[in-house]
Amino acid sequence: MSKLFSPITLGSLVLSNRIAIAPMCQYSAEHGQASDWHLIHLGHLALSGAGLLFTEATAVAPEGRISPRDLGLWSDQTEAALARVLKSIRHYSAMPIAIQLAHAGRKASTLVPWEGGQSIAPENGGWQTAAPSALPYDADSGQPLALDGAGLQRIRNDFVSSAQRALRLGVDVIELHAAHGYLLHQFLSPLSNTRDDQYGGMLENRMRFPLEVFEAIRSAVPDDKPVGIRISATDWVAGGWDIEQSVVFAKELQRRGCAFIDVSSGGLSPLQQIPAEPGYQVPFAERIRRETGLTTIAVGLITEPEQAETIVSSGQADMVALARGMLYDPRWPWHAAAKLGAQVDAPRQYWRSQPRGFKTLFKPG
């Protein structure tokens, strides 16, 4: 019996298996509004047989976008555009849908990756960025404004407003983005947070704003709606955020009703030294799971079905999330189920595609 293809519960939501499709930015929105590309992209991933589909990082305010082409959920127009996409997907797929709410902070206002990804100055069509402290990401980035009390309150409110819009869209899971060097991660790391008020300095203070945002979202949605978080477990830079601080943060999140923790790493500093190899981030998820008991999702260079099966069956993590591997092979869960002797959900229109040796691969229904 494959553990990877066994059910798991997040809050009151039961997932049919432990494979999640990770949030992957598409840089294809218009003024924050989902486009036909999102319908095609998310639509075919919703037919993959995974247990959970994350939409991409979704900005809670225009200035929180990584690029001008980022998806957003801050207005009636952005809500209506995403509603159109999700309605079409749900017509053909019962796969639960999760949304990742994000604010890029000092890493906002950049060109899309295929145009170079460089910082865009306000006079060239970009915007003024904001951060915990007035420290740019690198020498080529604009200097962010250090957020004051009013700015912090506005961003808290933006996250809550986007979460409420997500509820109206019928999203099944909400994830708070506190990883990859974006705003909430910037508060956590002493490399990017040099404040001398209640939001800077000691670990308790650096965790304060991310925890306030999480609490605000958790309080704004029904108790049975799973609310989780993605973190970077380490900056991969000496003197920065690390796994020990991540464990403390995870325990504080657990006390506040966090349903799961999605464990990634890096993204805060161009000085990072990442020893990228298959499953290189899994030990971080394993330690957080062991020390907190939180439901964990492991990510990062997980490409093979046997590898994913070992991660969940050995207790290193409760789930795995695939990103680039899923783009390369959008039917990865089908192929994994075939290798592991499991069954997977598939649309009736595709049932005839089962290879001769796998006539029981697709679940009847």
Image (cartoon, helix red, strand yellow):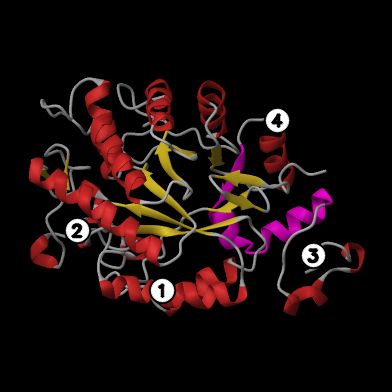
Residue 104 on image: x %, y %:
27, 50
Q: What residue type is labelled 2?
A: Glu
Q: How far apart are marks 2 and 1 (CA)?
A: 22 Å
Which is more foreground, mark 2 or mark 1? 1
Element under label 1?
helix
Whichever of callouts 3 and 2 sits on the residue coming sooner in the sequence is 2
Q: How far apart are marks 4 and 3 (CA)?
A: 26 Å
Q: Quick check: 67 above or below 182?
A: below
56 relative to 205 in the view: left or right: right
Q: How far apart are marks 4 and 1 (CA)?
A: 39 Å
Q: Quick check: 295 above or below 334?
A: above
Which is more foreground, mark 4 or mark 1? 1
Whichever of callouts 2 and 1 sits on the residue coming sooner in the sequence is 2
Q: Quick check: 198 above or below 143?
A: above
Q: What residue type is labelled 4?
A: Ser
Q: What residue type is labelled 3?
A: Phe
Q: Mark 2 points at which residue?
A: 63
Q: Distance between the residues labelled 3 and 2?
A: 44 Å
Q: Mark 4 points at which residue?
A: 314
Give the residue at the far front of this rendering: 223
Q: Give the range drawn in magenta.
A: 318-341
Which is more foreground, mark 3 or mark 2? 3
Q: Mark 3 points at which residue?
A: 362
Q: Residue 83 carries which label?
A: 1
Q: Which amino acid does label 1 sit on?
A: Ala
Element under label 4?
loop
Viewer-proximal residue among 31 and 100:
100
